[in-house]
Image (tube, rainbow, N blue to C red):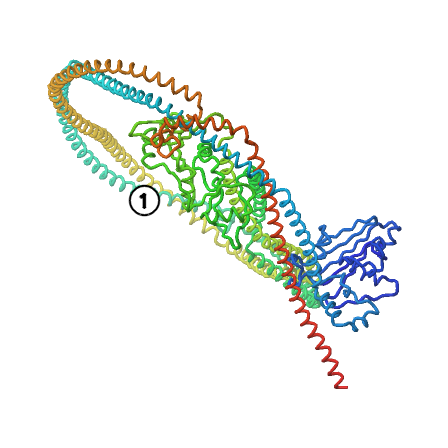
Amino acid sequence: MYIKEICLEGFKSYATRTVVQGFDPYFNAITGLNGSGKSNILDSICFVLGITNLQQVRASNLQELVYKQGQAGITKATVSVVFDNSDRSRSPLGYEDSPEITVTRQIVVGGRNKYLINGHLAQPSRVQNLFHSVQLNVNNPHFLIMQGRITKVLNMKPPEILSMLEEAAGTRMYETKKETALKTLEKKQSKVDEIDKLLDQEILPALEKLRKEQSQYMQWANGHAELDRLRRFCIAYEYLQAERIKDNAVLEVEQVKEKIGEIDIEAHRMKMETQELDAKVSELTAEKEATMGGEVKTSTQKVDALSHDLVREVSALKNKEDTLICERQNADKMERSIEELKQSIESRASVIKSAEDGAADLRKRVQDLSKNLVEVEKEYQGVLAGKSNQNEEKCLEDELADAKVAVGNVEIELKQVKTKISHDEKGLKEKTEQLMSKHEEAASLESELNTRKQEMESVKKALESLSYKEDQDCRIKVLQQERTAELELVQKYKDKIRILSAQLANVEFSYCDPTKNFTRSKIKGVVAKLIKVKDSSTMTALEVVAGGKLFNVVVDTETTGKQLLQNGGLQKRVTIIPLNKIQAYVVSPAKQHAASNLVGEENAKLALSLVEYDSELKSAMEYVFGSTFVCKSREAAVKVAFNKDRDFNVKEPCVTLEGDIFQPSGLLTGGSRRGGGELLRQLCARADAESNLSIHQKKLSEIENEIAHLRPLQKKFQELNDQLKLKEYELELFLGRAEQNEHRKLGESVKKIEQDLTDARFVLKEKELLYKNCIEKVSSLEKSIKEYQCSRDDRLKDLEKQIKGLKSQMQSASKELKGHDHKREKLVMEMEAVIQERDSMVSQLDSLRVQIQTLAAEVDEQKVKVASIKENHDQALSELNAVRSRMKECDSQISSLLKEQQRLQSRLSEINLERKRLENEVKRMEMEQKDCSLKVDKLIEKHPWIASEKQLFGRSGSDYDFASRDPVKAREELEKLQAEQSSLEKRVNKKVMTMFEKAEDEYNDLISKKNIIENDKAKIKKVIEELDEKKKETLKVTWVKVNNDFGSIFLHYYLAHQLN
């Protein structure tokens, strides 16, 4: 640890805030002009280190350390020293995790003085301990070696050198703590002497006097207790005698009443049986008369009706089958006729086709002749008009004039094209030379363009290789929203757990480890926190069942419990349940089964079965919940707790869902239970909240992990995307500049001229070819005009002959064609009549087939109907036979029931006589019971203790053992003891027990304080011994260090001297 920075404000000559930085870890020197404040920096360090001798900092009091002693408006001085604490091996105790330690000291004019460590207020002793732990003691007389003291140090004697080494080693801290411990030890000893004096002079004499008075009081109290015991013994004997007589009478009455009840049950059962027999006889008679008689008649009528229906349906089936056969024969005849008509149609169609083929040849011939006639006539008209052939619209002279005009136009166009080509060739040569001169500039632009495109492509590839897409920004926003929602839920559940924990403070169990390396798993915890309720509706009942045991603490063994009570530092009284020693009473499975049979399994459950717990806690849970039933209703609880039936004898404590308690002894507890089950509900709510909290914390962690994973990718994607957009924009700007470049413009001009030149040359070739064709056409027309003048008359004669011959051939061909058409029409009409007849027969055949299918379906349906009627007829016949046999059985049953009814009526009259006799016996016993009950009630009213202790009356080994002690002698001893106690009561101090307990508590309190002080003295002595040992170890280390350093120094000077 070394000084890293000093900040001064208002200290001595530093009026304003001044920060001194740049300290070296090993060696520093302060230089400057006189009066510049060099010494004040050293004084500020000593001021923070807590120097007490102000003369070392050239001041007589703290106020003089403030700038101009506070007279210049500055009323406080503050110095902060920042220490570099990166070397943890040399860090002060408790500050190993702080990379820097800032110690601040501030004084205010008027006297306030305070220290701060890392911005927090601290006591001066804490600051001193911090510096002492790293061997920094500013109050060490040798901490500062001032000018002129070096010679004094060199001339020191061995004891003085040892003192200086002790100071340098930092053992002064041990000496200071040892002196403080010795002073504390003296104070403790004076306190022990004071306690001893108080015990000897005041407490012990008073205690001895009270002890004597206590013995007298105990003698009187024992006599009084014996008197009370004898009195109770005699009263209990008297009560037991009366109770025994009453109980015997009650028991006998109950037995007789039970017999009467059994007789009533038997009589009622017999009456019910008699009524049932009457009902059965009436029912059988009515059934015989009404049901069976009517059933026989109905069955007979049914059989007759079914026989009639069967005959009718069979005849209908036969008729339908005959009709179906006839229709099928007609369909076969019609199919043969249709086939014959079809063959006739095919033969007629072949004749019509041959006639149509002959007519088609004639029609084609007429058309050809007509066409030839029109062409010849047209040619004849053209020759008359002077045309070279019949297709031309103009005469030869007009065509010749047009051809000469076309030759002139083409010649002009040829000249224009040639002129344009020469002009373009000249411009192309000039532009090409200019373009070559700009080639280098174009090459550099092209290179730069390629470079920019490559850069853009590399950014695109990097962006595509990144496993992040732009649509994942929405995912991050959704995750952030989910994180906000989860944070709110986590905070909500934390608040809920904090509120519930505050409400459940009495369930919390805190303790200190009773032994070193104590295994905390031995302590299982409070019972209420170790269970989980299966059904929330039973929480009130379970709280009542467990009672205060819910707050008991479960441990593994009694040894752990003993250690916890003695050394666990418990803040409140607790009851401990050791798992290896606890003896639990659990309701037997037989009783549980009996309770289930008595009221139903769902209406009475053992409390133990309503909670969940770890298997290792079974004995503790049986102790808490194993002896009581939880019932859904009061009726079920009364049955389980008080039922005396041997088959259902449970008699165990029961608690209802509302918290009412039913004890087998007759004790009932109930009424309002506000907030019943609230403790278990709160524990359940806290467990649910903790479970939800862990779920949402896990989900929050997953969301944060996903966000943390996506954030760097998003950042990288954004950077690359921005770079890509920038590159695209730069490329667009560059392309815009390149388009405005002169080389590019020249290149485009050259390309345009070359294209124009190519087009012009192509046009030139076309025009030359056209010019040549026009010249040839003119010469051809001139030649044709000369030839046409010679051959015109001969052609006109030939054409007239051809026209006459074609007209005569056309007339003969048309006459022959009309004969063929008439014959064909006749054949077509005959074939259409045959086709019409065939279609009519086909439609009749289709309707006949549909009719046949309908008839076939009706036949099948009729067969099914006949089979069904036959089956019903057989079944009705068998039912008729069965009814007749049942009528015979019914008659025999009625006779046997009448005999049983007569027997029951005779037995019922005998039971009624026995019941009247028992009722008279009950009235006599109840009178005897009433007399004894009055006596018992008077004793209970006069002596209330009888109700709580009557179960002990007459029990062997108890205070009411009448067999081992004669009640008559006990009555005599009672009278004698009453006389003795009346005389002793006048001499006894009845407040002595309270006075003795108070004096004894005071004595024990002083002894406890004395023991505590003695223990503190032993601990202080042990601390002093440890401080001496640490001082010796530190001095030894320092001695070795100083010995080695001085040895190396002297060796250096010795060798230097030898060399000289």
For numbered disc 1, what is the local secondary structure? helix
Residue picked out by circle 1: 361
x, y percentage for residue 1055? Answer: 73, 83
Which quadrant, please, contains the N terminus? Answer: bottom right
Q: Quadrant of residue 967?
A: top left
Q: Is residue 107 above or below residue 1047?
A: above
Q: Is residue 486 above or below residue 838?
A: below
876 or 667, which lies in front?
A: 667
x, y percentage for residue 19? Answer: 79, 58
686 or 163, which lies in front?
A: 163
Residue drawn at x 57%, y 32% is 991
x, y percentage for residue 156? Answer: 78, 72
x, y percentage for residue 68? Answer: 88, 54
Which quadrant, please, contains the C terminus? Answer: bottom right
927 or 73, which lies in front?
A: 927
Residue 910: in sight, yes or no? yes
Amino acid, disc 1:
Asp
